[in-house]
Image: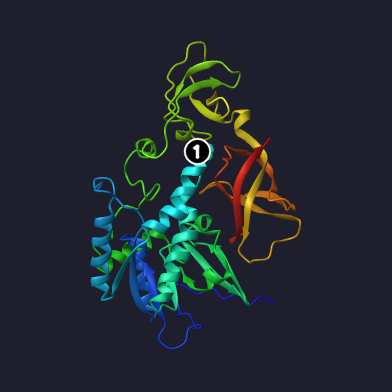
């Protein structure tokens, strides 16, 4: 018999915390974390905010909104009557997230720094610092749910599947889930904006942040050129014909259509071109026509660095669902565990543009089970 507990939006406060529980909320200056703080106050918690600076802007304020974000977080905390702490995790971010990001691009892969940021900064550096300040738990504005089944903590998709962020949280473990709260997991985004407006928050209509946090609004290529030298080379078809020049393999990802730099190519149909592969040994970008080109489709992959949220891996063969990119519908698959660092995943249906370096995240219905890094794509 299951003992699953799942708080409703009327939200009772966490009964595992005695006395006057103190929660520190990661305040980004955005509407989600602002409402998360308000909801926790409404539930009777003692609440404070924490603004994290994770990147040194170097007078590049036209691209980075850190100063405006801090001003917005400060205004919201003033409205709520709570203290706002500030902390600089720039060195931790560089060492634990950005250096890995660069290495992956150098190796021809496409990393997901948001997943690593959650693992190393928000649920490690921030959690440790918040505990040092006396917090019982931390909270964030993520759209996901934490449930408890007997002694086991589980990560589940948000009620608002359009905003669900469990994909980016698959690296969390039992200890981190036990010490975290996701107040927005039961709500839909329009509800959150209405709450923010009714509370008089200055940021109620603020645009959601998108893209990689440390790049801001600037062009990705311009940013990356500051850290990695570009190596131009040939753009070739899948039969090896040279049809153009690329600006550097690191600027392209599998399945990409826009930004390749190919217009009409003599001798070929007037149809869009897609990135099919990166030939690192010859520094060639392989392209083809057709959104479902055979070279873009695969039914299996090898993954590494498998993390299972429960802490206990399933049997050697496990049937579940998975996503190989954010917002992808769940795909039925079979996970085969191996003794080596690499585990195999076989899908029931063809998958398009599965990309090495990205994450494959496993689900059983609404429950996020864990995930791994995609290493090799197989036909």
Foreground residue among 181 and 329: 181
Measured from the top left, where is residue 283 in percent x and y?
53, 26
How was this image coloured?
rainbow
Measured from the top left, where is residue 121 in percent x and y?
44, 61
Foreground residue among 93 and 69: 93
Q: Residue at x 27, y 52 (%)?
A: 65
Measured from the top left, where is residue 102 in percent x and y?
46, 43
- Is 347 on the left-hand or right-hand side of 116? right
Does the rendering let one see residue 184? no
- The answer to whether 105 is drawn above or below residue 264 in the figure is below
Q: Quadrant of residue 311?
A: bottom right
Name, please, the residue furthest toward the bottom. 19
- The answer to whether 363 is drawn above or below residue 80 in the figure is above
Foreground residue among 246 and 148: 246
Q: Which residue is mark 1?
A: 106
- Is 224 on the left-hand or right-hand side of 306? left
Q: Could you classify mark 1 by the number of other residues whose Cα lies within 10 Å: few (under 14), some (14-19), or many (20 or more)?
A: some
Name, please, the residue furthest toward the top. 267
Measured from the top left, where is residue 152 in percent x and y?
62, 73
């Amino acid at each position: 018999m299951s003992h699953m507990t799942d708080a409703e939006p009327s939200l009772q406060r966490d009964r595992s915390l005695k006395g006057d529980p103190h929660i520190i909320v990661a305040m980004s200056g955005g509407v989600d974390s602002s409402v998360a703080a308000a909801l926790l106050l409404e539930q009777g918690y003692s609440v404070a905010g924490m603004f994290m600076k994770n990147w040194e802007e170097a007078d590049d304020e036209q691209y980075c909104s850190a100063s405006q974000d801090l001003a917005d977080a400060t205004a919201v905390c003033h409205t709520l009557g709570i203290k706002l702490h500030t902390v600089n995790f720039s060195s931790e971010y560089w060492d634990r997230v950005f250096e890995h990001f660069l290495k992956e691009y150098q190796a021809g892969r496409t990393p997901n720094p948001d997943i690593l940021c959650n693992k190393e900064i928000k649920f490690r550096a921030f959690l440790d610092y918040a505990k040092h300040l006396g917090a019982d738990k931390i909270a964030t504005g993520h759209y996901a749910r934490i449930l408890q089944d007997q002694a086991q903590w589980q990560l589940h998709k948000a009620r608002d599947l359009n905003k669900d962020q469990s994909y980016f949280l698959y690296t969390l473990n039992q200890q981190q889930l036990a010490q975290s709260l996701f107040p927005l997991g039961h709500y839909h985004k329009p509800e959150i904006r209405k709450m923010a407006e009714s509370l008089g928050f200055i940021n109620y209509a603020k645009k959601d942040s998108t893209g990689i946090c440390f790049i801001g609004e600037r062009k990705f290529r311009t940013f990356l050129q500051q850290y990695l030298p570009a190596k131009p080379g040939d753009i070739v078809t899948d039969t090896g014909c040279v049809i153009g020049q690329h600006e550097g393999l690191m600027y392209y990802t599998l399945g990409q259509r826009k930004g390749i730099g190919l217009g009409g190519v003599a001798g070929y149909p007037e149809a869009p071109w897609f990135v099919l592969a990166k030939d690192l040994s010859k520094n060639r970008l392989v392209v083809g026509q057709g959104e479902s080109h055979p070279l873009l489709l695969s039914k299996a992959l090898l993954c590494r660095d498998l993390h299972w949220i429960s802490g206990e891996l399933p049997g050697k063969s496990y049937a579940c669902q998975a996503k190989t990119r954010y917002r992808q519908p769940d795909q039925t698959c079979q996970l085969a565990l191996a003794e080596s660092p690499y585990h195999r995943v076989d899908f029931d249906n063809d998958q398009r543009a599965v990309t090495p370096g990205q994450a494959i995240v496993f689900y059983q219905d609404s429950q996020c089970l864990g995930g791994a890094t995609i290493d090799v794509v197989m036909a």
